[in-house]
Image: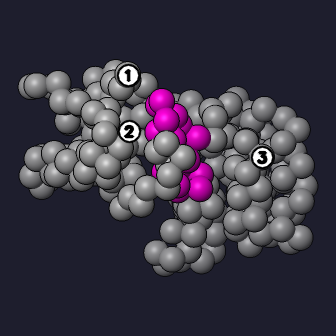
Amino acid sequence: MRVLVVEDEARLAETLQWGLEADGYAVDLARDGEEGLELAQQYPYQVIVLDIMLPKLNGYRVCAALRDRGVGTPILMLTAKNGEYDEAEALDTGADDFLSKPFSYVVLTARLRALTRRGRTGAPAALAFGDLVLDPARRTCRRAGQPVSLTTKEFAVLECLLRHDGQVVAKHEILEQVWDLAYRGDPNIVEVYVSALRRKLDAPFGRRTITTVRGIGYRLVADD
């Protein structure tokens, strides 16, 4: 597995390279944002470890540029910063995960394994089903060419359905993917968000795209 590490702190970069190579990864290092952007476009990495505070181009700009250019490689952002706004900005620019320094190497490698299991490399920037288009990198949704405003959870539920490409998605699967395994609230919360999506995406356009498979979950169906 080939990994790109974009990190200007020499000691950390070399430590990551040594550890990852010892675990069987092939590792390329970039010491600034411009070099990282060039390498990420040139080679088919399975995952990118990207620091935010970089010379020349910061990690936010590198990530946004890669997503704008259609590079779907999973990105794990590293930063010495902390706080929800930094994490939100990292994710909003197209990162798939976020890890604050100092971090545990065991946690980092577990995050990398999780990202590569999702198989996002080479994936299109946007998810489409008929005239419904969701762009996870830009956090936008459009139906019949018209923008549709979604809350964070509505967006996540719709993304879950779209990534299953018309297959039935069980309610518990949506809970696990959108609310995670630690969620202990009412599982009927899924129905609330599906209903909200229908009001925003189906009713105004005269469609019935999101259907209920009784006793199982939901699926997207083509509306002729």
User: Which residue is the site of mark 2?
Assistant: 160
Observer-side mark, 2 or 1, equals 1
Spot occupied by residue 40 in the image (x, y as percentages of width and height)? 81, 44
Q: Residue at x 55, y 60 (%)?
A: 91
Instruction: Determine the secondary structure under disc 2.
Output: helix
Q: Residue 224 carries which label?
A: 1
Spot occupied by residue 151 in the image (x, y as percentages of width and height)? 36, 61
Q: Which residue is drawn at 31% across and 36% down?
A: 207
Q: Quadrant of the C terminus?
A: top left
Q: Quadrant of the N terminus?
A: top right
User: Which residue is the site of mark 3?
Assistant: 69
Instruction: Determine the secondary structure under disc 1.
Output: loop
Residue 128 counted in the magenta span: yes
Spot occupied by residue 41 in the image (x, y as percentages of width and height)? 84, 42
Among numbered discs 3 and 1, the one appearing first in the sequence = 3
3D distance between C-alphas at marks 3 and 2 = 23 Å
Spot occupied by residue 165 in the image (x, y as percentages of width and height)? 43, 25
User: Is 90 situated above or below 158?
Assistant: below
Among numbered discs 3 and 2, the one appearing first in the sequence = 3
The front one of 6 and 124 is 124
Observer-side mark, 3 or 1, equals 1
- The quadrant in which residue 51 appears is bottom right
Q: Which residue is drawn at 78% across and 40% down?
A: 27
Question: Looking at the picture, which amino acid does disc 1 mark?
Answer: Asp
Q: Horizontally, is 208 left or right of 42 in the view?
A: left
Question: Looking at the picture, which amino acid does disc 2 mark?
Answer: Cys
Question: Looking at the picture, which amino acid does disc 3 mark?
Answer: Arg
Tell me which segment is drawn in magenta.
Answer: 126-141
- The quadrant in which residue 32 appears is bottom right
Residue 103 counted in the magenta span: no
